[in-house]
Image: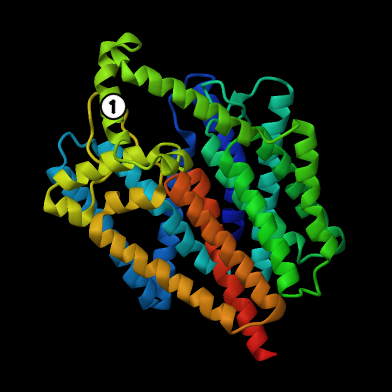
Amino acid sequence: MLTRNKLVPIFLVFLLLQPVLDVLTNLLMNTFGINLSLGIIVRTLVMLVFMLFVLKEVFTNKDHSLMFHIAAITFLAAMQLIVTLLFKEGASLGSEITFLVKSVYPVVLIFALFYLMRSKEELHRLANVVMINGIVISAFILVPTWLNFSFDSYDHGLKGSLGFYSSGNEISAVLMFAYFFSVYTLFFRKGKQTILPFLSVFLITWSSFYVGTKVAIGAILVIAILFALAIFIFRMKEVKKTNAAFLAVPFIFSLLFFNGVPAAENSQMAEEQQAARNQKYETPELFYAADDVARISEVVRLREKVNPIITKIVSSRDIYAIETYEDYERAHVMRKLFGLGYAGDYYDDVDVKIIEMDFIDYIFSFGIVGTVYFLLVFVSFLVFTVKAVFSTRGVTRGKILYALFAFLLAMSVSLLAGHIWFAPAVSIYLAAMVIMLYRVTQLDTMVESNS
């Protein structure tokens, strides 16, 4: 029987297994050559279990609000798939269904956690598991790197090591979420309870320097600054100011250890490599195979339509966004309404993939109707949280504001660098953050209003 008491520990164990699941998937595919996405299979099966649990809870409790959202999401997903199969030339049923599963995965988890995580004690356990994951992931990055058998973050000469992982952007996003939970917990626990968040903060910071991406080091730096500011601005007397100073220690240690910031060095090297490529692009037939020349000419055409500063910030993702927008302009009106599906239109000479800017991908994939629904939900959630900010004071307001700003930072990373909403290995942490923000806002506001 799918009861809440049984599923809370099951979810926490499932969350705890995420780092190992990703390592096994990567080793099977990239080391042993077994083309089996263990992560997708396990996560899909677990998603189905939680989907049944959510449906049971919704109809048992006659929760009309969630009934509406489930009906709306089901309608949007079904219409997108039907329209894609009817009007998208050469649509791959497998790719389209896989993309839909990845799209609804975080939604199912958010709904499930809404029923599972109801008390501060359960949030406490959730935070502990995420922090443990941060430590385990850091170990899976640091130890293989020290032993010199790790995967590289980049395949074209830039610095960075991923340990046993294969995607720099995804693991950077996971580290960002783990750091958020670690810092949040660090400031509201005392004595021996601070050991776990202290260790997690230190190892996540150190491993983020090894990864070498802008997301990894940039996001945790912003989170550290946000919370340090929250402490002093809202005069959190319950929080030790020395904890804020501690956040600087891992950064200083890592800066001295690496003699700089690898992510910054990578940015400079990437600019130099791009400048060299641009020179070759002027006469591509001299440097590239005939099959590649047409694609290079297309890239050059698209580059003329973009802002070079934005291109640098988003690592050329805006070029793919413009290409997908051109697909959207040519699309049937039904596809404009309900989305282009996975990765716009397919081209035989191009690897099929999404833009990797989550909100932009969502707009094109789910169309006008899907985007309007998403914005209504997103704005409603923000209004709920902002109201709580203005109805509280002191430490409660500081806690809610910090969680809100960290959530908005995650959304910004999702927009600019992707690999959050449509990456099940990461979106589970997004679901945990959303529920953390919602419950902290709800429970702390309730306590303050009764005091």
Label 1 Cα neighbours within 10 Å, binned few <14 / some 14-19 / many ≥20: few
* Residue sitting nearer the eye, 434 or 101: 434
In the figure, 331 relative to 128: above or below? above
Q: Residue at x 70, y 65 (%)?
A: 229
The image shows residue 444 at horizontal and vertical percentages of 64, 78
**In this figure, which colouring scheme has been used for the structure?**
rainbow
71 vs 302: above or below: below
Whether residue 246 sits left or right of residue 322 in the image: it is right
Q: Position of residue 137 (x, y in %)?
A: 66, 39
* Image side of residue 111 versus residue 267, left or right: left
Q: Amino acid at mark 1?
A: Val
Q: Residue at x 52, y 19 (%)?
A: 32
Examine the rendering and report whether any part of residue 234 can be seen: yes
Q: Residue furthest right?
A: 191
Q: Residue at x 80, y 69 (%)?
A: 239
Q: Which residue is mark 1?
A: 350
What residue lies at 62% left-to-right and 71% top-to-bottom? 400
Measuring from the top left, give residue 418's x and y in whole percent.
45, 45
The spot of residue 153 in percent (x, y) is: 57, 29
